[in-house]
Amino acid sequence: MKSRQAGQRSVLITGGTGSLGHALVRRLVNDTSIRRLIIYSRDEQKQYRMAQEFPEAQYPQMRYLIGDVRDYKRLKRAFQGVDDVIHAAAMKHVHIAEYNPDECVNTNVGGAKNVIEAALETEVKRVVALSTDKACAPINLYGATKLTSDKLFVAANNIRGPKDIRFSVVRYGNVMGSNGSVIPFFMGKRKDGMLPITHPSMTRFNITLDAAVDMVLHAMEHAWGAEIFVPKLKSYRILDLAEAVGPQCIKQIIGIRPGEKIHEEMIAQADAFHTYDLGKYYVILPQRFGFDLGDYIAQHKAKKVPDEFHYSSGTNTEWETVESLRDLIQAHIDPAFEAHVLEVSA
């Protein structure tokens, strides 16, 4: 991010004790332009552990607030004096959302609405909301709620009036090593000698935590408001991931779970008409009054994608291999991983 006057900004992260929130804190805690870095979440135990990692004596800018994005009054109080909000709080597990639909809607849709209204009623300047590839052409409730959330944040720019505030969205694939994701799941299961495979043709996009943080901070600094940013990522085949993690394990096909896709999408063909290539990222631009498309294209050197463009993990042109997946796991999740695999394979 561009440097600003020391101690100028206050940044709040909803869901700040999650995997991405934690990675954001590690990056932002050394940013001298930040006066306060506020963690807003409902898990006191995770906040307690984070406070041990970032002790007050060494990191006096850290603040911890217990709260739920479903509680508008608490959220509005938390936003007092805040400049930037990163909205990472959500119910994220597909099968849990299918079984608890009301809770998913209340958190992911109602929570998004509360974040928007609280930001508009305070002095917040920028809001970046985290989305998911499952929000593109959703077939499960989680994806549908995140698509609704995306639409709410994009539309919030239409009701901001004269306020100096910008809402934008970042949409990415599976974050490597995040809580509840497939790689830690496979690594935990390999001791049993069997890795469950939902479908042999399944593919997924892959993004590291560091790359996800880079994207959030890019949106925070450069968004005009109402954009949906999408990173250019490699895909992997679930069977290649299973081979990378457990080469000697039995790969047992168990069938897809309710709401799962064989391939994930991040940009549907219907969105191609409004999608531009920024180099490192794609961006889906808004169709709203007052957004100067020509100026945006000129300033960002944006190039229109073809009208038939469709960004899917199954038709992607860039792929991880078994070897590259092992390298990524060793670099980003478990430094001892490769040695363990070789030992098991010997």
Image (cartoon, helix red, strand yellow):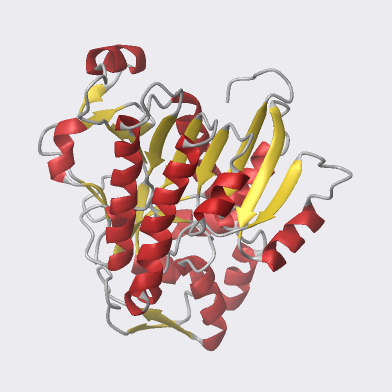
Residue at 37 percent across and 30 percent down: it is 160
Camera-nearest residue between 80 and 43 = 80
The answer to whether residue 276 is above or below residue 316 is: above
Total residue callouts: 0
Q: Is residue 215 above or below residue 316?
A: above
Looking at the image, is 234 positioned above or below residue 255? Answer: above
Identify the image quadrant of residue 108.
bottom left
Outermost residue, right direction? 57
Q: Residue 119 vs residue 33: left or right?
A: left
Q: Residue furthest bottom?
A: 192
Taking the image as shown, residue 15 lies to the left or right of residue 317, namely right
Q: How far from the left and from the top, in percent, is residue 75?
A: 55, 50
Q: Position of residue 192 (x, y in %)?
A: 53, 87
State whether residue 170 appears in this view: yes
Question: Which residue is found at the position 65% from the left and 28% from the top?
Answer: 9
The residue nearer to you, when weighing 99 against 152, is: 152
Percent position of residue 236, x then y: 36, 58
Q: Camera-side residue: 82 or 136?
A: 82
Residue plotted at (31% across, 77% down):
198
Give x and y (percent) for residue 242: 42, 71
Q: State whether residue 319 appears in this view.
A: no
**Which quadrant holds residue 99?**
bottom left
Q: Quadrant of the C terminus?
A: bottom right
Assign the N terminus to one quadrant of the image: top right
**Residue at 55%, 75% in the rendered image:** 345
Q: Along the horizontal axis of the image, is 322 left or right of 14? A: left
**Rendered position, 109 above or below 60:** below
